[in-house]
Amino acid sequence: MTVRFLSAGQEDEATPVRLVEGSDRTYLRDLTEAQRAYVSAIGFEPGPGRLALVPDVAGGIDCVLFGLGSADEIDRTPFLPGKLADQLP
């Protein structure tokens, strides 16, 4: 799921944040082969509060993956995405 907080036409100025459920791997299909290899190499698993800054080909940030964990995990709360404020560059 990608959350957007911008008006139409501002998408090019934003970096998408993808909220990833613990067992959901469909987010991988939106990534390039190189990005999937990177995510695998850094050991990203979508546990509660886990973050991955996924690079683009120019070395910038293409998107952010933020793990929500599984629905039954004790660390998963409605306030979990609030951690993004401390974790994002």
Image (spheres, rainbow, N blue to C red):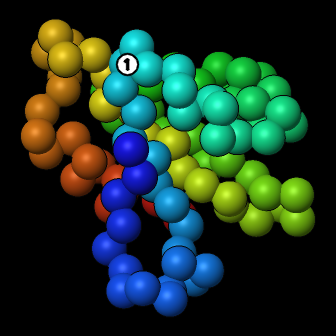
Looking at the picture, tell me which residue is in the foreground, 12 or 67.
12
Image quarter (top left, top right, bottom left or bottom right) of the N terminus? top left
Q: Quadrant of residue 30?
A: top right
- The residue labelled by disc 1 is 22
| Residue 31 seen | yes
> Callout 1 environment at 10 Å: few (<14), some (14 to 19), or many (20+)?
some
Which residue shows up at 13% across the image and 45% down it?
79
Which residue shows up at 67% across the image and 47% down it?
54
Residue 29, image x, y percentages: 65, 32
45 over 10 or under it: above or below: above
Looking at the picture, tell me which residue is in the foreground, 26 or 15.
26
Q: Amino acid at mark 1?
A: Gly
- Relative placement, left or right, of 6 versus 64 is left
Which residue shows up at 86% across the image and 37% down it?
34
Q: Quadrant of residue 22?
A: top left
3 over 39 or under it: above or below: below
Q: Secondary structure at mark 1?
A: loop
10 over 74 or under it: above or below: below
Residue 56, image x, y percentages: 79, 57
Residue 88, image x, y percentages: 47, 59
9 over 58 or under it: above or below: below
Residue 10, image x, y percentages: 50, 86
